[in-house]
Amino acid sequence: MFRTLLKSKIHRATVTQADLNYVGSLTLDPELMTAANLLPHELVHVVNINNGARFETYVIEGEPGSRVVKVNGAAARLVHAGDLMIVIGYGLVPDEQAASVVPSVVFVDEHNRILERGSDPATAAGAPVLAGRRAATRNGLEGAGHVSVNTDAAGTSPPDLSDQDAVLELTGEEQRELEVLAARLCATGPEELDSRAWVEAARDASAALPLRLRRRLARFRRDPGDEAVLLVRGLPVDPDRLPPTPTVPGSVQRHPTVPAAAITMIASQLGELYAFREEKSGALVQDVVPVPGMEEFQGNAGSTELTMHIENAFHANRPDYVGLACLRNDHDNVAGLKVASARLAARLLPADVRMALHEPKYFTSPPGSFGLVDDIPGPEGIFRGNPEDPDVRVDFTSTEAIDDDAREAMAALGASLAAVARTLVLRPGDLAIVDNRLCLHGRTAFRARYDGRDRWLQRVFVSLDLRRSRASRPADGHVVHSAVGRTA
């Protein structure tokens, strides 16, 4: 009997080059190969820490002393120079020798210089640590009152966004302004979050949001940038003062809270809050939590990996923006919001593939909860609008192509999205705003414990043009009674 065991590992190697014009392989400095006990042409598994992409290839020797870590061939689409990678080698070992195997693990610095050799400790002495942004975790569900600020988050890695203009971290003074404003709205506003009066009160109050935040939201509304995501850090959330994480299907926030007030005010600066009757019973602020027995569910109640998608891609009145605010992350702090910009992905695609994605050859099915299984719009294109800067409409769980050419184009899009994907491990007080016209999102897997302290996000939908859905909103309210159309 044989066992497959870890034999070799190079931890956090920095990609020095990605070469599409070379035969598929991974070029390494011979010193790294020797230290990790890797031979030329040996099979290795590679994990891109920055975007989660994984691939298999073989190693070849580079120039001695060059510290080269070069990805060659098609796999070069999955990395960028400067990305961090883990290179792993496995070996088949007879069962009687398995207990004595000691892997060769190499830790390197940002220049691929060897720092330490070991047998896979969690961290290496002297290894570089990414300086964390100071967390701004603040009070949760009280309507008013003083809230303490927890800024002791050293060692937390900054979000993996290549465009740092996509991150806005509120200053201490801005946090206090937002806290006071949210508490005042809770104390004086309507008692029902889902009422028209609350939406109007939140919109009025949003005019007093910190000036720098309002200006950044206005710029994002005009142009969401290459990443098509804006991460606002420092909302008033304190996970230690929250109630237990809900565990029931369809959980929502019906009554005003400080976090919900902050979220709705910020969303109101982007457009109009709204919801779908068939989803979370039409609540404007919805809980995203793991539900017992639904671990494998492809939706917000699951804890398995959530496939990349445009929110409600099937729907003519799908959101323009999706806001996801973190109240509490999972116990292991591994659950990540995955985002992938179609703007970045499209640049990796040949012109003929981009044009193929504009062809009306794709159907996207609605989930059963919408009760519209027999009313599927389409066929439509995945891309629409300007060929050089298209909007995207796809759900990799429910979008299907009608012929082989369309399937190949969709597969190419999936590969390019994987190459540009980012994983954001949200922490309490983070609000990720995803431009749903340009950016897909999903989730990495995590383990739920159902002990009241599981991952808890709150979600809002925003429309730039609420008038567009007027025919589906009784009494001109903020809840769409779904009627799937062919235009949007």
Image (cartoon, rainbow, N blue to C red):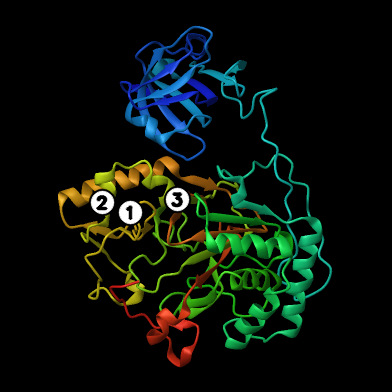
Determine whether the residue tagged by mark 1 lies in a helix, strand or loop. Answer: loop
Q: Name the residue under label 2.
A: 355
Q: Name the residue under label 3.
A: 341
Task: Tell me: residue 114, above or below residue 163.
Answer: above
Q: Are marks 3 and 1 in contact (CB under 8 Å)?
A: no
Q: Which of 327 and 268 is in front in this view?
A: 268
Marks 2 and 1, how far apart in space?
7 Å
Q: Do the residues labelled 2 and 1 touch (CB within 8 Å)?
A: yes
The amino acid at mark 2 is Met
User: Residue lying furthest left in this view?
Assistant: 403
Q: Nearer the viewer, residue 394 or 206?
A: 206
Which residue appears at 40% of the width and 78% of the height? 278
Q: Mark on residue 387?
A: 1
Q: Is residue 64 left or right of residue 390?
A: right
Q: Which of the two labelled residues, at mark 2 and mark 3, occupies the earlier sequence position?
A: 3
Which residue appears at 20% of the width and 59% of the height? 361
| Mark toward the viewer: 3 or 1 | 1
Q: Where is residue 133 in the image (x, y as percent from the top left)?
A: 71, 45
